[in-house]
Amino acid sequence: MLTVAIQMDPIEKIDIGGDSTFALALEAQARGHSLIYYGPRELSFRDGKVTALARPLSVRAVKGDHFTLGAPAVTDLSTTDVVLMRQDPPFDMAYITATHILERIHPKTLVVNDPASVRNAPEKIFVTQFEGLMPPTLITSDRGEIASFRAEHKDIIVKPLYGNGGAGVFRIRQDDENLGSLLEMFTQFYREPVIVQRYVPEVRKGDKRIILVDGEFAGAINRVPAAGEARSNMHVGGRAEATTLTTREEEICATIGPELKRLGLIFTGIDVIGDYLTEINVTSPTGIHEVKRFGGPDIAKLIWDAIERRKKV
């Protein structure tokens, strides 16, 4: 039996029908592992020790009554077997600091995903490591470079470099006069560069979420954007549907899989539009429920199989 600490956002606010962390907690509990829960603000480093104000956790698949917490206690996380780092982005300095702290106990305590690899793999930048897989892409704060990129590719997508969940994603067509105002707004809200990509029209057929477990393909769903919407994220109206992998998508998985495994990125979700890989999600990937709902494998089981192999359970 393993002692599993789950670092996540408030458990009382999650949607148990769609939350991947909850699926992982249910599976861990079903295997006899003991669970403790804490939020990222309850993580501390003091005198060489990584601790958290954690509570014993039990979970159940009952909407509105899905968890019970015990009394809080300061817990030395080096005495646990596994830490699931599962809070949602933004990938900001608070997130980065948490990876530095958890790195102090890894790999004796297995942190999933590897905190150093998470820190070094920002989701929209990490993908640039794999040449030939992305659509034409520009990362910059230079408006001249952005204007030149737009002049070349006509129809573009502009989004925050460290955004998530489809927030702040804009499609700018050749005749759109709003690019200047948009960049001014981005400058006010973000210090970081923006990412600009050539619009891939195949997104109308879907943005495929492919899940890899320890570098191996585990399952996929297709997310089709709603009419009049450039984003396919489920919470902005995207529709999930069953899918299979194309030959190109199999090639993408085969190309990136060994590196994901080497880096200790046990649970990753990649996004593919047409023939292009657009993101590699390593912070808090989702999609477990949707894959299972459409007849795919129980990915929570596959993830725990991978974790238990590493812990030699």
Image: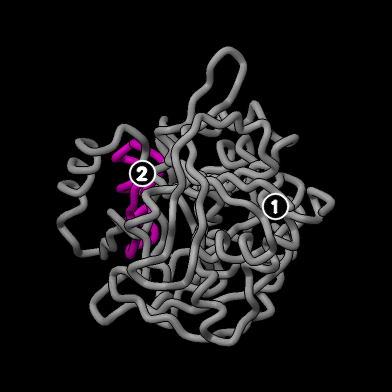
- Measure the alpha-carbon separation of dots 1 and 2: 25 Å
Q: Nearer the viewer, mark 1 or mark 2?
A: 1
Give how far across and how far down residue 4 sits, in percent.
62, 48
Camera-side residue of 214 and 139: 214
The image's mark for residue 260 is 1
Say if the magenta span includes residue 158: yes
User: How is the structure coloured here?
Assistant: one colour
Q: Along the line of sight, which residue is nearer the eye, 175 or 246?
A: 246
Mark 1 or mark 2: whose residue is earlier in sequence: 2
Note whether residue 309 is visible. Answer: yes
Determine which residue is flagged by label 2. 194
Bounds of the magenta segment: 140-164
Looking at the rendered structure, the secondary structure element under dot 2 is: strand
Viewer-side residue, 90 vs 278: 90
Q: Residues within 10 Å of mark 1 (few under 14, many from 20)?
A: many
Q: Position of residue 109 (x, y in %)?
A: 70, 37
Residue at figure coordinates x 28%, y 37% from the top left? 190
Q: Work out whether residue 115 or residue 31 is closer to the camera in this orientation and state it.
A: 31
Residue 121: horizontal and vertical position, in percent? 57, 43
Q: Taking 78 as reference, is 296 above or below it?
A: below
**Residue extending furthest toward the top:** 47
Amino acid type at image mark 1: Leu
Name which quarter of the figure residue 225 lies in: bottom left
The vertical placement of 21 against 109, above or below, is below
The correct choice, above or below, for 8 with respect to 177 in the image is above
